[in-house]
Image (cartoon, rainbow, N blue to C red):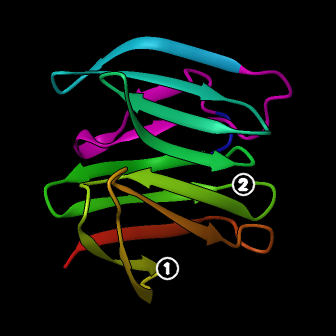
Amino acid sequence: MAGITELIKVAEGGKISFGNHELEKKAKLEDFPFAGDILKVKTCKEITKLEKNGAFAYESVPGTTVTDFEEREDGVSFTVEGAEDAQITVGLMEDTEYEVLIDGESIGVMKTGLSGKISLGVELAAAENVSVRIEKR
C-alpha cells in the first residue's frame, strides 16, 4: 500500500487512506474535503501527520502509510504500514479511557489527558501491516 500517490484518498466505506512512508522528502496536501471536514496531511519517511479542521488527529514517527482510517464516536480504527517500528499518537476525546487493541489483542486501557491524545508503539519491522483499534470504555 505504500504507494498512495494522492497522499490522501477516500477508500471504500467512507474511510480514508493517507501517508507514504517511502517518500524521501516531505510532501503535504492541504484543504482536502472529507465528510464536512477539511483534512491536511504531511508525510515522508521521517513523519506522517494528519490534521482535521486544523486540529491534531494522527502522527507517527517515523512515517507510516495508513489505510482504512475511521473515526467514530466511540474511538478510531486503522491499519498501518511502515519500514520500521513506529510511535503513533492519536487525537481523541480529552480525559477519557480507551482500550487499545493491536491486531485484535488488547494492550491495555489508556486514559487521555487534557490534550486528548494517546501514544502507542507499533512493531512494524516484521509485519506487512498492523491493525489498530482504540475503543472508548
| Rendered view: 82 above or below 40 | below
Does residue 28 appear left or right of residue 79 in this picture? right
Q: Amino acid at mark 2?
A: Gly
Q: Secondary structure at mark 1?
A: loop
Q: Which residues are magenta?
A: 4-26
At horizontal 42% and vertical 84% (from top left) the residue drawn is: 104
Does residue 16 appear left or right of residue 48 in this picture? left
Taking the magenta stretch, the answer to whether it contains residue 23 is yes
**Tag 2 residue:** 82
**Tag 1 residue:** 103
At horizontal 33% and vertical 54% (from top left) the residue drawn is: 116
Displayed quadrant of residue 48:
top right
Q: Which mark is residue 37?
A: none
> Which image quadrant: the C terminus?
bottom left
Q: Secondary structure at mark 2?
A: loop
| Rendered view: 68 above or below 76 | above
Which residue is outermost to the right?
24
Mark 1, residues whose alpha carbon is within 10 Å: few (<14), some, or many (≥20)? Answer: few
Q: Amino acid at mark 1?
A: Asp
Displayed quadrant of residue 118:
bottom left
Of the two numbered discs 1 and 2 on the same chain, state the one appearing first in sequence: 2
| Rendered view: 74 above or below 66 | below
Displayed quadrant of residue 78:
bottom left
The overriding secondary structure of the stretch rendered in magenta is loop
Q: Which of the two residues, 116 or 25, is positioned nearer the viewer here?
A: 116
Q: Position of residue 27 (x, y in %)?
A: 68, 18
Q: Position of residue 100 (x, y in %)?
A: 40, 77
Taking the magenta stretch, the answer to whether it contains residue 65 is no
Q: Position of residue 123 (x, y in %)?
A: 70, 73
Which residue is outermost to the top?
31
